[in-house]
Amino acid sequence: MRNFFKVAVISVLVLALLISVVIMWYWLDARASFQSDTYACRTVTTEQATAAVMKNVLLNGERLFSRPYLTQKDVLIEEGQVQIGHTGTLVPFMIEGVYDRRYFGMAGCASLNAVEYATEYLREL
């Protein structure tokens, strides 16, 4: 019975150590990502942010916006509203012919190719 408790205690300690290592790894990874975005945002221009979002929209237009064959003329980027923050960029735009929605392309400064999107509805449906 004594050996069972020793094995149980050791197993619990090993499991706790393993969980601690995984949590520390995720924390260090998030911290490194945050720092790389912070340093990269110092050099990112609005033109770079706009070009990254435009490229992503044109590559994924059918899948993201249900519009096949989007061209550069179909994507109306609000260049005066582009924002570059401490860790990321925000590029507002509209799609030609879709006037009830405004889209936002968001990316971290260190990885401008990884764009995420949000939608703002301009009118009640």
Image (tube, grey):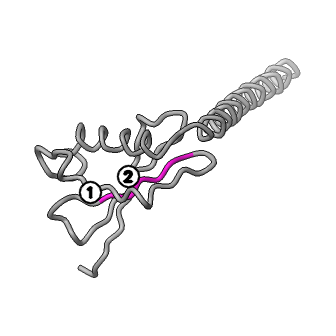
Callout 2: few (<14), some (14-19), or many (20+) C-alpha neighbours within 10 Å?
A: some
Residue 76 is marked as 1
Relative to 98, say whether 124 is above or below.
below
Q: Amino acid at mark 2?
A: Tyr
What label does residue 41 carry, if any?
Answer: none
Horizontal and vertical percent for residue 78?
36, 59
* Residue visible at 58% across and 37% down in the picture: 43
Rendered location of residue 48, percent (x, y) = 43, 39
Q: Measuring 40% from the left and 42% from the top, which residue is drawn there? A: 115
Q: Is residue 84 above or below residue 26?
A: below
- Range of magenta residues: 88-93
Residue sitting nearer the eye, 13 or 39: 39
| Residue placed most toward the observer, 125 or 50 | 50
In the picture, the quarter occupied by the N terminus is top right
Image x and y of residue 107, in percent: 47, 44
Q: Is residue 115 above or below residue 10?
A: below
- The residues tagged by marks 2 and 1 sit, at their Cα atoms, a distance apart of 15 Å
